[in-house]
C-alpha cells in the first residue's frame, strides 16, 4: 500500500536513546511528510544516521525552568 505524501504536513519526533530500528522508522516517516523535525532528548548525542534533510536539535544540558 502506497501512502500519498502531503507537502503541507510536517512531523515532530522526540528521540530518547534510540535503537537501530529508529533510522528505518524515520525513513518511512519522511516518505509521508514534507519535513521532519527531530528533537533528541537522549542523555548523550546519538550516532544514528539521518539519510535525508531534517531539522535536528540536540541540547547537551536540559534546563528546568521554575514554575510561577
Image: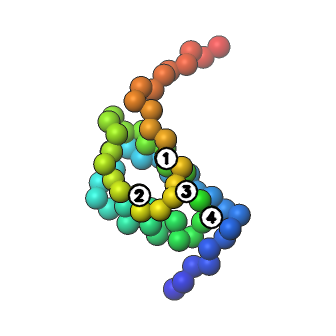
The residue identified by callout 4 is: 34
The image quarter containing residue 40 is top left
The residue identified by callout 2 is: 50
In 3D space, how far apart are the residues under numbered discs 3 and 2 (Cα atoms)? Answer: 10 Å
The residue identified by callout 1 is: 56
Q: Which mark is residue 66?
A: none
Q: Relative to residue 16, is residue 6 depicted above or below?
A: below
In 3D space, how far apart are the residues under numbered discs 1 and 2 (Cα atoms)? Answer: 9 Å
Pick whichever of labels 4 and 1 is earlier in the sequence.
Answer: 4
Q: Secondary structure at mark 1?
A: strand
Residue at 46% from the left image edge and 69% from the top image edge: 28
Percent across and percent down for residue 43 are 33, 34
Pick whichever of labels 2 and 4 is earlier in the sequence.
Answer: 4
Percent across and percent down for residue 11 are 58, 57
| Callout 1 touching callout 2 (CB < 8 Å) | yes
Pick whichever of labels 3 and 1 is earlier in the sequence.
Answer: 3
In 3D space, how far apart are the residues under numbered discs 4 and 3 (Cα atoms)? Answer: 7 Å
Residue at 65% from the left image edge and 13% from the top image edge: 68
Q: Which mark is residue 36?
A: 3
Residue at 68% from the left image edge and 68% from the top image edge: 7
In 3D space, how far apart are the residues under numbered discs 2 and 4 (Cα atoms)? Answer: 15 Å
Name the front one of labels 3 and 2.
2
Percent across and percent down for residue 48 are 33, 53
In 3D space, how far apart are the residues under numbered discs 4 and 1 (Cα atoms)? Answer: 15 Å
Q: Relative to residue 53, is residue 64 depicted above or below?
A: above
Q: Relative to residue 68, is residue 3 depicted above or below?
A: below
Pick whichever of labels 1 and 2 is earlier in the sequence.
Answer: 2
| Callout 4 touching callout 3 (CB < 8 Å) | no
Amino acid at each position: 500500500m502506497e501512502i500519498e505524501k502531503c507537502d503541507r504536513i510536517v512531523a515532530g519526533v522526540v528521540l530518547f536513546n534510540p535503537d537501530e530500528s529508529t533510522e528505518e522508522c524515520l525513513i518511512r516517516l519522511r516518505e509521508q511528510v514534507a519535513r521532519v523535525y527531530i528533537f533528541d532528548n537522549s542523555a548523550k548525542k546519538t550516532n544514528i544516521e539521518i539519510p535525508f534533510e531534517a531539522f535536528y536539535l540536540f541540547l547537551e544540558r536540559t534546563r528546568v525552568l521554575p514554575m510561577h
